[in-house]
Image (tube, rainbow, N blue to C red):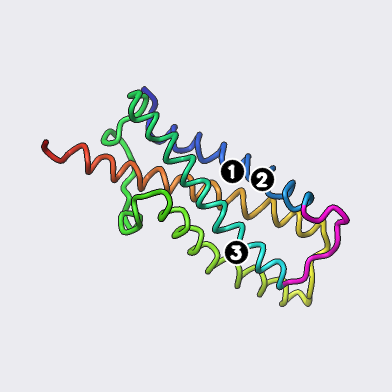
Amino acid sequence: MHDTHSYIRTQATISAIINMIANPAISWLVNRDMQATPLTGVAVDTTITCLVMSTLIALFTTSALERALKSGSIKAHDDAPRAGMLSRLPHAWWALGPSLGFGFALVLVPLSVGFFALLGLSELPFRGFAVLKILYPGAMAFAVTRWVIVRQLQAAARLSSVPS
């Protein structure tokens, strides 16, 4: 059996690494001529990335967690972190992922566009955009994965404590 905190840290790190590689690669595939991206494009891309990435993370993370719980490699009630505010979010992955993604988009889009505007930029050169697509998706993927696991463990613990 794995320590729950170790399981969460490992899964979140793997998710961060995957997203730090996949997101700039997707950006390059979409923009092979490596044109600069206007700030409106940065805002749209960030919003879409937040929503899609959080939803996919919620799907894959929930599936992996369910397998780990069924196999007994981790337990829902042993030393899981408390869900706190996360317990107010939906339990189903298809609602949890977009909820987290929407929250991240509400924070990241104004911050990033505002920051670049303060620097006097109206567009990001491709390399700058690629660096952006390495940094925030990695950090976001770590947080989303962690939060999905904590939320799902809390829901699983609640279900396992209900008498049959």
Tell me: 157 left or right of 61. left
Residue at image point 57% right, 36% down: 14
Real-space CA distance between mark 3 and mark 1, rounded to the nearest whole angstrom: 18 Å
Bounds of the magenta span? 30-39
Residue 62 vs 44, above or below: the answer is above
Q: Residue 20 bears which disc, if any?
A: 2
Q: In what element is the residue under mark 1?
A: helix
Q: How busy is the neighbourhood of tag 3: few (under 14 within 10 Å), some, or many (20 plus)?
A: many
Residue at image point 28% right, 45% down: 155
| Front-most of residues 40 and 122 | 40
Residue 29 vs 3, above or below: the answer is below
Q: Residue 155 bears which disc, if any?
A: none
Q: Quadrant of residue 95?
A: bottom left
Prevalent SS, magenta region? loop
Q: Which one is earlier in the sequence, the residue at label 3 or at label 1?
A: 1
Mark in front: 3 vs 2:
3
Residue 141 vs 161, above or below: the answer is below
Q: Are marks 1 and 2 in contact (CB under 8 Å)?
A: yes
Q: Which one is earlier in the sequence, the residue at label 3 or at label 2?
A: 2
Question: Dot 3 corresponds to which residue?
Answer: 47
Question: Dot 1 corresponds to which residue?
Answer: 16
